[in-house]
Image: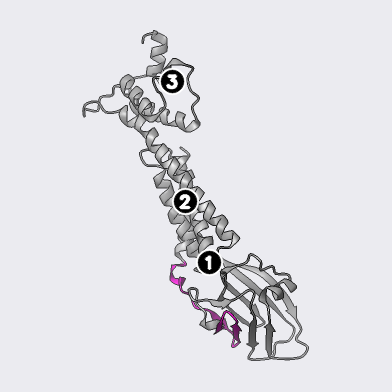
Amino acid sequence: MRRPLTGAILGFLLGLAIAVIFQQQGLYPLDQVSVFLIPGILGVIGMLLLSIGREGGMVAYVIALILLIPALVWGALGVGDTNQKGQLNGGCLVQATSSAPDQTRVTDSYKRDPFKIDPQGSLHWEAASPTIFMDYDWEMWVEIGGIAVPFDSDHELNDGGSPANMGDVGNVAAYAQSVGVNLDQLRGVFMVGGFAATCDGFGFVVLTTDGLTTPSIVAAILALLILIILIILMFRGRGGARVGSTAVANGGNGAPEPAADIAAGAIASGYATPEATEGPPPELSDDDVDDIQEALDETFPADTNQADDESPFGRHEDGGGA
């Protein structure tokens, strides 16, 4: 059975789409909780929804859980940091003022209250170190799903021997473009950090937006499509399951009536109609074949005295009776 695995994958993708929408709109960054825990939970829900009324397929369940459990565990480890505060170690000081308007120090920014930057506005920053750093390395990174991803680094000589660094730009997007960073579609809240010599730390910033960004629109469309697919597969799975349920019970005593019940279940589930019996047999999809095979397996369990190759359809053909 492939549907438990399909449900797990679709549920996980739905969670990722929701995480991107929240991040792009400046509501919450792409941390462990939003990238792994919530998608993992939705993956489990998707797996269960597509398994309602269906039996078997243990291999698909195992594969789905192997994929989901590590994501759930890693995501759960970040639950305690859902409103994490910025940090700065080594005695350094960094503060900034933007035209958003906002003013903050790195240590005053929070995951749910980040420093606001207008990409089309101005930005002023000041940084100071406890001692003069000479001939040192520095690196900047952004965190995605609890993993620091470096995006810039260099080696600084600091020949002037200054313990301070400051800057003032009139247009953040234009300045970023001049240093090779395109902010045209880069919006949302981010956890940004790095190190310089003996100082290191991180803070939270949000590039503000007036409406839906292109990534938000794409993620919203993807989320809607996934929901539609999940609903279709869920109800289709329930319809197929009726074949097995109508072919098992007989007056409450559990005795099967294979020919009548399987035919009734097939007609009720759409696999056979009175009109279909008058022409050539319809083509069945792989899922249809799986559903019918489940019904036969439930009606003729392996521990009976029937041969494996026997079925009511086989006896019908051999005997020639109606």
Q: Which residue is mark 1?
A: 25
Q: Report crowding for label 1: few under 14, some 14 to 19, many 20 or more residues within 10 A (C-alpha).
A: many
For residue 48, above or below residue 316: below
- Eyeballing the image, is 137 above or below 132? above
Disc marking residue 216:
none
Instruction: Give the foreground label among 2 and 3.
Output: 3
Residue 93 placement (x, y as % from top left):
60, 87
* Figure quadrant of residue 277: top left
Reply yes or no: does residue 88 show up in magenta: yes
> In this picture, which residue range is highlighted in magenta?
78-103
The local secondary structure at tag 3 comes to helix
> Residue 25, relative to residue 46: is it above or below?
below
Residue closest to the far right:
159
Residue 11 is marked as 2
In this orientation, which residue lies closer to the viewer: 63 or 291? 291
Q: In the image, residue 171 lies at what x, y percent?
A: 68, 77
Q: Which amino acid type is marked by label 2?
A: Gly
